[in-house]
Each structure stands twice: as C-alpha cells, then as structure tokens.
Amino acid sequence: MAAGIDGTGDDGMGEGTGEGMREGMDDGTGHSVGDGVGGRRHGDGAGPADRARARRRDEAVRAAVECGLLGPGTPLVGLLDVRGIRESAAALREAFEAVVAPGTPVLHAFAVKATPLVPVLRLLHEEGVGAEVASPGELALARAAGVPPAATVLDSPAKTGAELREALELGIAVNADNPQELDRIDALVGSCPSPRSPLGIRVNPQVGGGSIEALSTATATSKFGVALRDEGAREWVVRACLDRPWLTRLHAHTGSQGIPLSLMAQGAARTYALAEEINARAGRRQIDTLDIGGGLPVNFGSEATAPTYAQYARLLAEVVPGLFDGRYGLVTEFGRSLLAKQGTVVARVEYTKSAGGRPVAVTHAGVQVATRTVYAPGAWPLRLAAYDAKGRPKSGPEAVQDVAGPACFAGDLLAEARALPLLEPGDHVAALDTGAYYFAHHYAYNSLPRPGIYGFAPDGSGGVAFATAREPQAPEEIVTEAGGAHASALTTLRASGRP
C-alpha cells in the first residue's frame, strides 16, 4: 500500500427522567457499552457507509505504520478520515434540505469546541458548514480557517464586553445569555436601529435532562440561557424582544450526549412556541430565525451511525412542523455527531505484563487524550480495536485484559477487563470514535506531549495520503508552556518587586 504525507490532504417527552435512554433508537445514546465496545465488530446495525469507514480506518492505520507516522519514535497519533468528514457534512445538509421549505435560509454552524483544529474548520467551511464559537480563542480559530462572520455564531454564558464589541463590529451573530448581557448589548447597539450582527436571546426550555447530568443543558437549574419556566421569565423575554426590534432570534440547546431525541424535539417545540407568541404580540414577524442548537448523540457502542441527522430532522418535522414551513430561518450547532466517528487515536503497545492474573497492555494513550473516558468510564466507554506491529487488524483468540495509559496514576486505563486479541509489545491499540472531544483536547498530565493529528484520504492509486492537521508537540514547546522563559522569576523575586 502506498502512503505519503503532503501538505494539503485530499479530500419520551417527559420531564427529563431519561428513561427513554434505554428504549432503543429514540434515545440514540450509543454511549452504553453494548456488544460493539469489545473491538472489531462492524455489524450491530452498521450500514454500507459505516463499513466503508471502518475499512478506510484499517487501511489508514496500516499506512501510518508503513510510512513512519506511527512507530517507536512516534507511539501516539490521531487520525482523521477526510472523506468521512465530507460525508458527515453532506448528510447533515441533506437531512435538513429534505424537510425545510425551498428557499429557507439554513446555517449549519459546527460547534468548534468539539474539534478545535483550524484545518478541520476550513474543511467544514468548504463543505458548507460555518462555526459556532464560545470563546475568543474559538473565534480566532474560525477566522484563521476563513469562516466568514455571516457563517459564525457566538454563544457563551460569560462573554466579556470586549468579546461582544468585536462580534458586533464584525457582524457575527450573537445570542445573549441573560438580562445583564443584554444590557451590555444595549449599550453597544446604542441608537443604531439595524445592527450588523443578527442578535437573539438564548432560552432554557427547561424540558429536563438525559443520562449524563453534566451535558444536560435544559434542566430546571441549568446555567445556560433564560429559564423559561421560572416565574416572570417568559414574559421578560417577550417584553425584551418587543422593546428591541433588532432582537430577531431565539436560541435553545437542549443538551448533548445522553439526551433522547424526543427531549431535543420538545426543546425545539417550546422555543418555536415562544417565537410564535412574540410575533403574535408584535403583530409582525419579528423573530425570523430559530437556532435549535446541536446535541445529536453519538453511538459509541458499535460501528453504526445512530441516530442519523435524517431521523432527527424527520422527528422535528413531525413534532414542530411550523419550524420548517419557510417562515423561520434555521441555525444548527452540531459538533460531536459530525466528527466523532471520523477520528481515531492509535497508540503503540510499549510493554505487557500481568497483575492479579490479568494481562495488562501499557500503551501511550490514556488520560491525556481520553480524559472523560479515564475519569468517567461508565459514562464514556470507548470501543477499542487491536492491530499488530505492522498496523494490520490483529486476529486470534480474545483475552480479557486491561489497556493502560502512560500517566502515573492507577486509574489511567482506556479499558478495564476488555476482551481483545492478546496484545504484545509493538502492537497497536486504536480508540475508535474519538474525532470529537478527544485528541484535540489535550490534558497535560505528566507533561505528556500533544500527539500529531493527520488527515487521511485515498491517494488515487490504491494507497493512502496523509496531511498534517497538527504537528506533534516537541519537548521544547512543553518547556515554553511551563514558563521556561521565566525560569529565574521566582528565585529573584523580592518583597518589593513587581512582576
């Protein structure tokens, strides 16, 4: 197989009980362990596109070993399936095109926090997807990727005055999170009747939570948005809009991983009903755009992509038909669901041992790349796949074994008591479905370096081409981040001195 590196790359509507999470497709959680977590099964509902993605991944791992991207000197890499990312973006666009009225303005804005890499944002922009940003850093990434202000949305519960000013000067859409923030926007808008930026209010529909409390953003006490069911809050939102003709949007994000689709649809329905009320009281179509957030769950239990964007869009069309009749523009903010299954962390097995009679494979992937999995394995289990020293899928009898990371604490485990072909030094372990919230969110435990991240695509001649999305972190960069330029600062500090 040919392989090379180039610089471009190719290509239940109840109040949040969460009970629906165990009932099948409606929940779409996929984060429960299930049969597919053990390793290489490509079944469990996987369709042709899912199986093709698995084959591309296998080819990429082997090619990465062959061309030296992965080896003794570089024992940990992140791989991104460029073709898979393009297909994921196309599936999102097509799902909503199938249900919205012709001519309806739709902006799909990728949640940058999911995979904050400039090349990823550039690729998605090329595929017609904008950027949802929640910090000055994320805005800088989007701008570096060439995402225009018209395709950018700023959401954050803690926007500073400087952030708001920059967004309004650029013409970036802003969703005010609370009354105090709206006061700041008032001062910035001043007497301008038509600010450049589309402006709206984020509301919390308070429909309840899912199976992962930390990711449930529409609970009764969520920190996000204006809590619609609190006393006087709904009327405040209506009055705020009526007093400000330039408030033309409502935004709600019900949650993320662990949220049933039915709950997501209920959140959209309550936001739509509020828009209808505001417009009725205004006597005109003041609210012209609804931002329904993202949050489509990812199936971490098998190769199958479930639920799909098409399933979610059809459910929305059934539950909230007015959302798609052409009277409202639409904004979405999907993140994890676009990228998770397009990424893979691959680590070399450095040593193997036995403890308490159970085999242990010590690898270079642990808490630094899979922080949620290591600290909350019950909520964030990952599927693992075994490859041999040449990067080929490893076969042979399965053995129950632990897969450990390199960090110096006992809980640094990618998986515990997992059935896989018995791993040996020089083999490789792949953590699957890690294209979002994993290798691009480095946790610098033990000053472990950030891995290099590489996109891959067919090279046109039966092989695999790679492109660098992020260079691996060098030791001198770690020293710089750790204050290397100020090595003597504390030893020379005097009581009367100033920094």
Image (cartoon, helix red, strand yellow):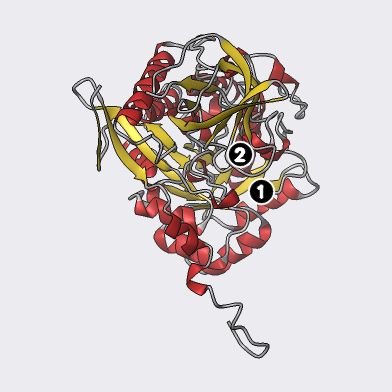
Q: Can residue 40 be seen?
A: yes
**Pointer 1 with pointer 2, Cβ within 8 A:** yes
Q: What residue type is labelled 2?
A: His
Callout 2: SS: loop
**Quadrant into which the N terminus falls:** top left
In the picture, measured across the screen, residue 73 lies left or right of residue 411, that is left
In this view, 182 is above or below 468 = below
- Percent of width and height locating residue 397: 55, 8
Label placed on residue 253: 2
Q: Which residue lies furthest to the bottom in this view?
A: 496
**Between 362 and 138, which is closer to the camera in this rendering?**
362
Q: Can residue 149 be seen?
A: no
**Between 253 and 143, which is closer to the camera in this rendering?**
143
- Percent of width and height locating residue 19: 75, 21
Q: Disc 1 versus disc 2: distance between alpha carbons?
A: 9 Å
Q: Is the residue marked by circle 1 packed among few (<14), some (14-19), or many (20+) residues within 10 Å?
A: many
Q: Which amino acid does label 1 sit on?
A: Gly
Label placed on residue 225: 1
Q: Which residue is drawn at 61% across and 47% down?
A: 202
Q: Which residue is drawn at 34% across and 21% down?
A: 59
Q: Which residue lies furthest to the right in this view?
A: 231
**Between 434 and 310, which is closer to the camera in this rendering?**
434
- Percent of width and height locating residue 242: 61, 53
Q: What is the total number of numbered labels drawn onto the structure image? A: 2
